[in-house]
Amino acid sequence: MEAIAKFNQFLRQKGLRRTKQRDELVEVFLRTEKHLSTQDLFDIVRKKDKDVGYATVARTLKLLAESGLCRVVDFGDGVQRFEHKYGHEHHDHLICLKCGRFVEIYSKKLEKLQDEIVKKHGYIQEYHKLHIFGLCPRCGKPGKRGK
Amino acid sequence: MEAIAKFNQFLRQKGLRRTKQRDELVEVFLRTEKHLSTQDLFDIVRKKDKDVGYATVARTLKLLAESGLCRVVDFGDGVQRFEHKYGHEHHDHLICLKCGRFVEIYSKKLEKLQDEIVKKHGYIQEYHKLHIFGLCPRCGKPGKRGK
DNA sequence: GGTATAATGATAAAGATAATCAATATCGTA
DNA sequence: TACGATATTGATTATCTTTATCATTATACC
């Protein structure tokens, strides 16, 4: 898999080592198409391998973020979640306040507009996070209650 | 002051009571034009009045948010910060990754575009948070270092 | 003023992330 | 292939912020 090679390359560059824990964690993380917290990934990996500690999961996720393979998402609930970046273009989030369901959104027009604003202020953009909170079609429908 | 009246009205509606601590905290909060964490506000108020506990500060800030007088901002450093809402139109943030300086940004065009996207997905927007991270003019200038 | 009960302050608890450290594994080198 | 410097690991502890607890005090309505 391409992304795994990228990660190993990153380790090399940093003078870090490849370990079976990292191999396993990265492999599972990349295969899981979700926004995972440290606890989430820990739980998943633990089902297969009892020899992985929580600290290693946390450390590996941090490395993944550093390597550029994933980004941190924060929905404001005090828990850091990690989502793929490699193979997933940048996107923003539209989150339902009632049921928690979310969709990933992307608009070239929106991105462009943001760039213009950033430039106008003399800033150089590295990245941005847009979270829109509201009610999804199901929860917003009058007469229906979400979840 | 108008905003304080709003807050007291909120308390009434909720069947909550007015106390000297709340009066003091709200007054100081509204007068301080910054994004304050619980600890920040606690420190400020403590200089004048030793009879205010940390818990009360936290509780009052939560009430202020509930009342609609302020909103929670999260720059991803694990600390909740509160900023005025009353008398301060909605805005987004442009934050420097090096020195931490930020500017508040607002674009009617951007807001409108976001609304369109939300509607396209059948969602009903309640609010959103846009944080753009990058380098400010000073830190981004080649040859100069931030801070 | 009396009284039900909300609010307070101090403290503990909870929950997440980060630090610590002895034991172990990795990888360039001999 | 074996060696050795050192990065990594897992378990645990520490840290930091937010939230809950609870006896005591203050508030507001009668």
Image: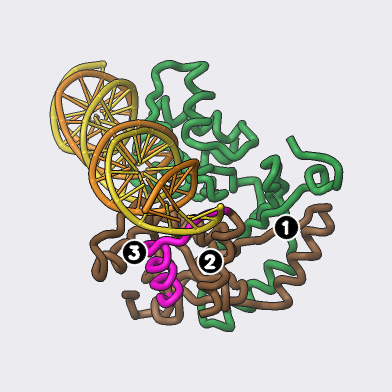
Chain colours: A green, B brown, C orange, D yellow
Mark in the foreground, 2 or 3 = 2
Amino acid under label 3? Answer: Asp
Q: Give the range drawn in magenta.
A: B15-33
Amino acid under label 1? Answer: Tyr
Q: What element carries label 1?
A: loop
Query: Marks 2 and 3, how far apart in space?
Result: 23 Å
Check residue B8 in the rendering and tell me which mark sits there, or answer none: 2
Q: Is mark 2 on a helix, strand or loop?
A: helix
Q: What element carries label 3?
A: helix
Asked whether disc 1 touches disc 3, contact meaning CB atoms under 8 Å apart, the reply is no
Amino acid under label 2? Answer: Asn
Which residue is label 1 attached to? A106
Q: Is residue A63 visible?
A: no
Mark in the foreground, 2 or 1 = 2
Q: Are marks 1 and 3 on the same chain?
A: no
Q: Residue at x 48, y 69 (%)?
A: B95
Q: Is residue A36 visible?
A: yes
Q: Residues within 10 Å of mark 1 (few under 14, many from 20)?
A: some
Q: Residue at x 51, y 74 (%)?
A: A124
Q: Residues within 10 Å of mark 3 (few under 14, many from 20)?
A: some
Q: How crowded is mark 2: few (under 14 residues within 10 Å), some or many (20 or more)?
A: some
Q: Along the polypeptide, which appears first: circle 2 or circle 3?
A: 2
Which residue is label 3 attached to? B40
Q: Which residue is drawn at 42% across and 72% down?
A: B27
